[in-house]
Amino acid sequence: MTSEEARANSPLSVASIVVSMTAVALGNGVMSAYVPFVLSRSGSPSWAAGGAVTAVAFGGLLGCVVAGPLIRRVGHARLFASSMALVILGALLIALGVNPILWIIGRLLYGAAGNTNFIIAQSWLNHAASNAWRGRAMSFFYMAYVIGLGTGAWAFGQMPAEGNLAPLVTIFFTALAILPISLTRLPTPPAPANVSVDIKMAWRNSPVGFIGVLASGGLSMMVQGFTPIYAAGNQVSQGDIALLMFVMQLGMLFIQYPLGALSDRMDRRLVLVFTCGLIAVMAVVALFASFTHLLLLMIVFAIWAGAVETVYSIANAHANDRTEPEDFVPLASTMLVAWSASATLVPLFVTLVTPGLGPKTFIYAAMAVAVAYGAFVIVRLLGRKPVPGARRDGFEMLSAQVPNATVITEPDDGRADRPR
């Protein structure tokens, strides 16, 4: 970045990126509440709502694979506009009326476009931000995006579920999202690094980090994707489901941040064990909590969702602690693919077995994943010493609902020069 560009790029200069992606999140929040609610209430096949959750995750996996080559081919701004067009086409398919197959295709399009947009935004933000305030900018970016998701879900509760108003609102926010980032004067970033998967390296450096990202991908898609389906199946009203999803996003802020800060001061693995225990306890409470006590249930699900987000962010931090700077790019690539694969396969499995095992299957599955991962971390605790303080990165807030492609999109982020 030239000195002139550095002077021009202040924290305010990246507002266009944050505004665009917040608008994307608002539209996604509306659709994430609308699709499972309508499919669960419309008499559609039992697999339809779960299939829509799986389609988003599988589309995300495709987006992670194709985003880099497409950015190198057409550039950030053109690809952002193109992927926004895919979001609009997906919402249009849903606006045509209830058709499970078309709706699953629409969510697949959103998943592919959504992850592509996130990689573009991360790349642009990393390139525009200076080392002095990049961390704060990324944290604010994630926070705005997650709050946008929750606000969009809450907005769905204020509109009729009948008809196609919800997908039209999504189209409106998506069209708005194109404007700020397309008109920005920020310099175009360099092309992202290649996605080079090295599972052996990731496992060798940090089994706890690698398995944690695998666990968090499935956990996040189960908790965030199947909760509205579960609530709709228990005849919870549209407004209450929308409020529930909004409160769940707030759980990220009130649970992840304090646990993440704690992990900077002690062995992160101990915090991960505690977090897995918290997930399992909240899952047990969710099994027996009644929807007649909705306020209590919302608190439980908010803590549950926040703990799931925490596994993702701390596992990423722990993996980086144990990785040399020259391996940051292949590590991030491997974690990205691992997260996407888990976020696809676990919801698919839950969707297939739910008709036979019942609507609470996702709760049991989340509990099993958390307990298994917690036990794995305990075994690693007994066999390997903690990372020395001088080798550790600081914790950063991340969302398990979107891929962390930061190092891929901007390999030279200043960490390569830190002392090890």
Image (cartoon, rainbow, N blue to C red):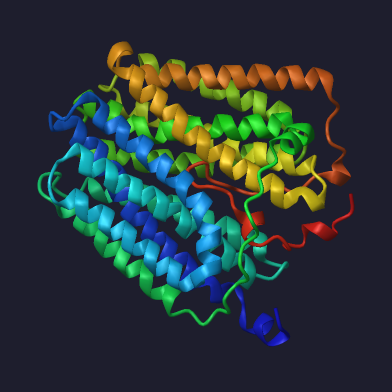
Q: Does residue 323 lie above or below 188 as drawn?
A: above
Q: Is residue 353 left or right of residue 74?
A: left
- Find residue 83 and report its horizontal and vertical position in percent: 39, 62
Question: Which residue occupies the foreground of this view, 296 or 157?
Answer: 157
Q: Does residue 337 lie above or below 193 as drawn?
A: above
Question: Which residue occupies the foreground of this view, 419 or 412?
Answer: 412
Q: Does residue 354 lie above or below 34 as drawn?
A: above
- Find residue 171 and report its horizontal and vertical position in percent: 25, 61
Q: Quadrant of residue 323?
A: top right
Residue at 34% across / 51% down in the picture? Answer: 109
Is residue 390 at all visible to an observer of this figure? yes
Residue at 68% across / 80% down in the picture? Answer: 6
As drawn, the residue found furthest toward the bottom would be 4
As drawn, the residue found furthest toward the left would be 163
Residue at 16% across / 31% down in the picture? Answer: 41
Count the marks: how many? 0
- Find residue 226 and report its horizontal and vertical position in percent: 35, 30
Is residue 255 at all visible to an observer of this figure? no
Question: Which residue occupies the foreground of this view, 371 or 258?
Answer: 371
Q: Quadrant of residue 37?
A: top left
Q: Is residue 83 left or right of residue 413?
A: left
For the N terminus, the quadrant is: bottom right
Residue at 58% across / 37% down in the picture? Answer: 338
- Find residue 179 and report its horizontal and vertical position in percent: 37, 74
